[in-house]
Amino acid sequence: MVEHAATSPARIWTMRLVYVGISLGILLLELLPLQTQPRGFAGPDMILLLTFTFALRRPEYVPPAVVAIAMVLADLLLQRPPGLMAGLTVVVTEMLRARSEGLRTLPFTVEWLTAAAGIVAVMIGYRVVLAIFLIPQAPMLLALSQLFSTAIAYPLMVLGSVALFGIRRVAPGEVDTLGHRI
Amino acid sequence: MAKDRRQEEDYLTPLRRLLASVVILALFGLFLVWRIDSPRVERFRAQVVDQVVPSFDWAMAPVNGMLNILRDFQSYTRIHQQNQELRRELQQMKAWKEAALQLEQENARLLDLNKVRLDPRLTHVTGVVMADSGSPFRQSVLLNVGARDGIVDGWATMDGIGLVGRISGVGEKTARVLLLTDTSSRLPVIIQPSGQRALIEGDNSAAPPVDFLEAPELVRPGDRVVSSGDGGVFPAGLLVGRIAQDPGGRLRVRLAADFERLEYLRVLRHLGSEEIRDPGSLIEPELDGEAKSGVGLSNAGPGDG
């Protein structure tokens, strides 16, 4: 029954709303004017991490349109070129979604490496496109520190999402409400 | 079972793929539109920020308050040390206050003697900082004053002491201040007392470097840096900071404004500096009306007298 509840349409739509809600919460915390001094170190990109965690563990909670809404809002509020980071994130989310089924039986390290590869792809792609379009970029060191901190923070995000929202990996043989295997 | 699922997905998957590609194309399209027609999309961004951030306010205020209390609480642990520091600083301040009072009197006397008129049009609007840029890559803050308060793009923004940045993006209720530390900030300045003109270029560090300096040997650490008003965007003479030299020997500006805590900012109303366009016209003696009407040289015959 528990598994059935986990994949009912109501649960799926609730979790989609939760995803957007957490993204808004993260944006709110980032926008707090607590630190107006330039920083030498960039923390992890939490919304990106959240999206990848969901995409690898419960892909049905993050359809492209929902990811696009959250990421475009982040682009607009965080003064990034609108649409670029969002587009890259949706592309990589789709790639991770395709891989998520194969990852279920593999150890966590493989999942972590896959997520890290996705993060690297998004961030390098972002810089490459900015360079092609001749848009001024952030300092390299800062971007690298964000890349590493994001990749390292993945397990923490996984722990958090398991503890708070019960986003665990689909177990082998798990079925949905209609009795289909997921 | 697994086979059933596959067959069922056969018609679902292409649809899903199509949807995903449409979303991705739309997003990259938005980026291209931004690249081609940036002002329009930036206006749209200002509108979105205008709608979203003030609605966050109810949630931001308590969180911000809590974190500030926490921060203050941390400082309690060093209270004795701070107390002593403050006492020492107070002692120094007293000396400075005395000097300042004397200078103020002297300055007033000199201004009076010279009949100097200070620019009366330099008034300001004060705004509260609502949000920062939210990303470590951009240095900007959002004020709670906007177009309805008469804020215009490009106006200078100060805290009580020094220049902080300029307005870049105005919404109905909010305005964004691009800080001097942002990588896209450039500010023409004069370094006193040598009078050298230079440019301050933000580079995402706390002390932006000085560039395009003609004679660096005339500039010494500790010199005052004020805005020069070149380009007509900023009023001249606003305090920016003091020159400092980093270990690499590069000249930087230690900003006078307290970037650690930006809370209330002043936006200076700047209605543009007046320009003198034409050279002065010919100065001629004042002529009475009769002479003026008969000034046509052809009429000025000998029979006139």
Image (spheres, coloured by chain):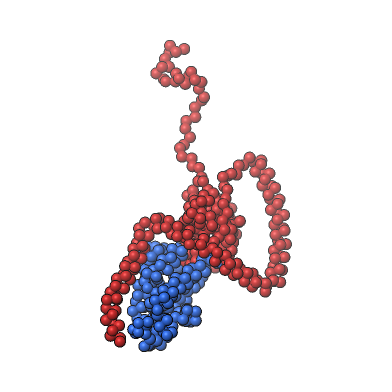
Chain colours: A blue, B red
Q: Nearer the viewer, residue B114 or A114?
A: A114
Q: Which residue: 35% across, 72% down? A: A91
Residue pictured at 71% horizontal, 50% vertical: B102
* Residue B201 shows in the view: no
In the rendered structure, the answer to whether residue B102 lies left or right of residue A43 reads right
Residue B303 image position (x, y, % from top left) = 43, 11
Q: Quadrant of the N terminus of chain A?
A: bottom left
Viewer-nearest residue: B179 or B204: B179
Task: Identify the residue at image location x=38%, y=71%.
Answer: A89
**Left or right position of A53 against B256:** left
Residue B5: quadrant of the picture: bottom left
Question: What percent of the width, then of the height, locates residue A100?
Answer: 36, 81
Percent x, y of residue B204: 49, 65
Q: How many marks?
A: 0
Q: Quadrant of residue A102?
A: bottom left
Is the C terminus of chain A in the top left, top right, bottom left or bottom right quadrant?
Answer: bottom left
Whole-percent x, y for residue A162 in the image: 47, 81
Q: Nearer the viewer, residue B250 or B39?
A: B39
Image height of B33 relative to B297, above or below: below
Residue under the image location 42 percent in, 68 percent down:
A70
Residue B59 is at least partly visible in this image: yes
Relative to B80, say whether B294 is above or below.
above
